Amino acid sequence: MFRKFFINCQEYIENYNIHLINTLFLSFSLVISALGALMITVESALPTFIRKTFRYGKHKCKDDEYSLANKLEVPKSWFAHFYIFAFGWSICAFYLVLKGMIMHSTAPDLVVIFLDFIGGGKNERKVLIKSNEALIATLLMTLQCIRRFYETNFVQIFSRKNKINLSQYIVGYLHYFGSILALLINTEGFVKDSTPSTFSFAKITLVQYICLALFHFSWSQQWKTNMIFVNLRKDSKTGKIHSEQHLLPRGGLFEMVSSPHMFFEIQMYVAIMGILPQSLTWKLIVIWVTGNQIVNALLTHKWYKENFKNYPKNRKAIIPFLL
């Protein structure tokens, strides 16, 4: 029964060239662009359900009368769950890319069939990403997932009162599911009749080295930014948690913007885009990530200004000097 359903779906995708991952991130981008713009400009006129979907954590919607939306909320600490998923999923992808390059062998047939299914069909999938680029990009994504896994499970201090909408929880899984697959869909060795090429530092271009430097800078600065958040809730002498309140962060890029961690998140995805310049899927991911981070940063910035009377006037929301 399931096999017949899968075959029918596969034939439909082949006939109409439906790229499920591109469709996913295009849909995310359109939703965040349209509803995000409405949230920023005419939030008070929007239904409570939409406002509760976008607002979470410290800037959550204060209207608690909408019972259905309340029932669809989960603890914000559940963020850790999809980083556990991303941790394992990214390592699997990195292993497959590395193994293919070392053994000079194509991906397992089941992997190729699955990528055909989600990537528009075997006739639609072409090699756009060289093995060198795929290995670097997959390694960077894996490093980010490992660090976020460590932070959310062992370092970050979540307020027990803070909630997120169930839709945000599901989107978190879909984001990492699709982003990591995007590194394989058009890669040598993962497309039918293609084989991985060998790794060489000589193949890394100047632009890619610049992107590597940008990623490293953003990756390390995001860690430092997140540690500023953690230290706000810890006693500097004992290291014990002394508060779950949202305090005014200072230091680092916080002196210029309200959400530097979101700014660095965008930069990391842009850096990977520079390593994968031919990937349309990754471009759609960058558009989605940028829109999502900007909307959340603007809402956070508004919350800071409403809750701290002496909030620094020179701070922007997410992009220094601009936004």
Image (cartoon, helix red, strand yellow):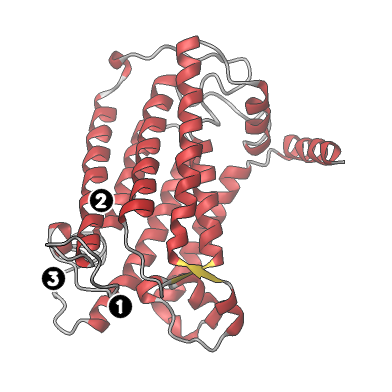
Give the x, y percent position of residue 219. Answer: 27, 44
Q: Quadrant of the N terminus?
A: top right
Residue that appears at 56% across and 44% down: 22
Give the x, y percent position of residue 195. Answer: 54, 13
The Cα atoms of the two marked residues, 1 and 2, are separated by 21 Å
How many residues crowd around disc 1 within 10 Å: few (fewer than 14), some, or many (20 or more)?
Answer: some
Q: Which residue is mark 1?
A: 303
Q: Is residue 131 above or below residue 304?
A: above
Label 1 sits on what residue type? Trp
Q: Which residue is mark 2?
A: 222
How many residues crowd around disc 2 within 10 Å: few (fewer than 14), some, or many (20 or more)?
Answer: many
Q: Quadrant of the C terminus?
A: bottom left
In this picture, residue 259 sits left or right of residue 188: left
Q: Secondary structure at mark 1?
A: helix
Q: Are marks 1 and 2 in contact (CB under 8 Å)?
A: no
Of mark 3 and mark 1, the one earlier in the sequence is: 1
Q: Which residue is mark 3?
A: 314
Q: Is residue 68 above or below residue 254?
A: below
Q: Is residue 280 visible?
A: no
Residue situated in front as seen by the camera: 322 or 263: 263
Between tags 3 and 2, which lies in front?
Answer: 2
Of mark 1 and mark 2, the one earlier in the sequence is: 2
Q: Secondary structure at mark 3?
A: loop
Label 2 sits on what residue type? Gln
The Cα atoms of the two marked residues, 3 and 2, are separated by 21 Å
